[in-house]
Image (cartoon, rainbow, N blue to C red):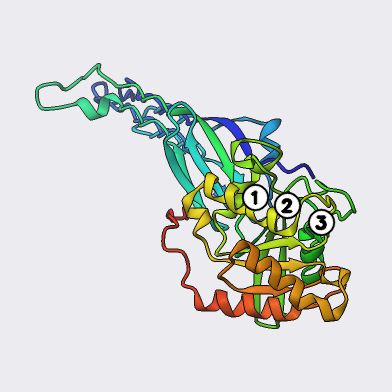
Amino acid sequence: MKFVDEAEIRVEAGDGGNGIVSFRREKYIPLGGPDGGDGGDGGSVYLIAAENVNTLVDFRYHAVFRAERGQNGMSRDCTGKKGEDCFVPVPPGTIVYAAETGEKIGDLTRAGQTLLVAKGGFHGLGNTRFKSSINRAPQQRSLGSAGEQRMLHLELMVIADVGLLGMPNAGKSSLIRAVSSARPKVADYPFTTLHPNLGVVSVDKLRNFVIADIPGVIEGAAEGAGLGLQFLKHLSRTRLLLHLVDIAPYQSEITPADAARKIMRELEKWSDELACKPRWLVLNKIDHLPDDEIDAYCQGIVDEIGWQGPVYKISALRNQGLQTLMYAVMDFLEQQKPADDIEYYEEIE
C-alpha cells in the first residue's frame, strides 16, 4: 500500500430545510389557521479516527464529502427530516488544518475520536411560528441557512512510543524486523525504506510498545533534502528516540562519529522540541568487529561525539543485545507520564 501522509479535501455540510407557508383546510374547519412546519437541520461533516485506516491515500481519489440537506417543512405542522451527518474515516494521528488560513482545527489521536469540521445549516421556520394575537394568518416563513463549506489540509503523524532515527542503511529496518512482527524491506543499499513502518514490541505478555521506523535522514533533511522533510515530523509524537549508528558504514569516508553528528545537527535544525526529546545512542552491527575490540571501538565513537546519554551496543542482524535494549526501553516508557498536550474531542454518540 502506498503511504500518503498529506492530503487536501473539501467538506460541505448540508443546508437547512426551508419552512413553508400552509393553512389548515378541512371540510368543516374553513378557517383552520396556519399549519406550516419547520424545515430540518442540515447534516454536519465529522472526521472520525478509524483503526482500520492507515494512510491518507484514499483522499487522492475521493476528495469531496457532503452531508445531506435538511428536508423542507410540511403542512399539518410537520417538521422536515434532519439531514444525515457525514462521517469521514481518517487514520489515528491525523492533524486537521484549515487549508486557506493554516489554522489548526483539531488533532485525532485515538480510534473512535470525532471532530466536527463543517456544521450543518439551521432549519427554516414555517408560518405557524409567526402567528400571534394580531397576526392570525401569517404569510411569513424563513429559509434554512447554508451549511459550512471549507477546504481542509490533513497531515498524518504516526503514533508510536519509540522512534528509530539514523542515516540510510544504519539498520533501522533490520532492528524493527528483529523485535516485532513488522516486515519492512531490508537490503544492502541505502534508501531501502521509503515510508514509515510501525511494529509492536512485546517484551512479555502484558508489556508492549509501538516502535516506528522512518526513512533514513541525510544531511540537509531539515531543508528538504531526501525524504527527511517529509518524515522527520513523524518522530514528534514519540516519547523516546533510538539513534542508530552504523559502526561499519557503507561509505568508508564517513566515520560513525560523523554520521551521528550529522543527525544531531538535522534534529536541531528541524525543531528544538525534537532535539530535546530523550535519545539513546544505539551502536549497530557490532558483529563486524572481533569480540575483544567491540568495547574499545564503541567507546572511541562515544568519546569523539561527546555523548552523555545511555549507550547500547547491538547487532540487529545477529540478534545481539536486543533483549537488553527492549527491556530497558519498556522500563523507561513505564516510568514516563503520558503526554499531557494531546487535545481530545468529545465522541459523537
Residue shown at the point (66%, 75%) measured from the top left: 208
27 relative to 266, above or below: above
User: Where does label 1 land, which residue?
Assistant: 262
Label 2 packing within 10 angstroms: few (<14), some (14-19), many (20+): many
Label 2, on which residue? 167
Tell me: 97 left or right of 55. Answer: left
**Can residue 205 be spotted in the picture?**
yes
Q: Give the residue type that dot 3 points to.
A: Pro
Q: Secondary structure at mark 3?
A: loop
**Does 63 appear above or below 234?**
above
Dot 1 amino acid type: Lys
Q: Residue furthest left?
A: 134
Q: Quadrant of residue 202?
A: bottom right
Residue that numbered label 3 is attached to: 249
Q: Secondary structure at mark 2?
A: loop
Q: Would you say 252 lies left or right of 270 here?
A: right
Q: Residue at x 76, y 51 (%)?
A: 254
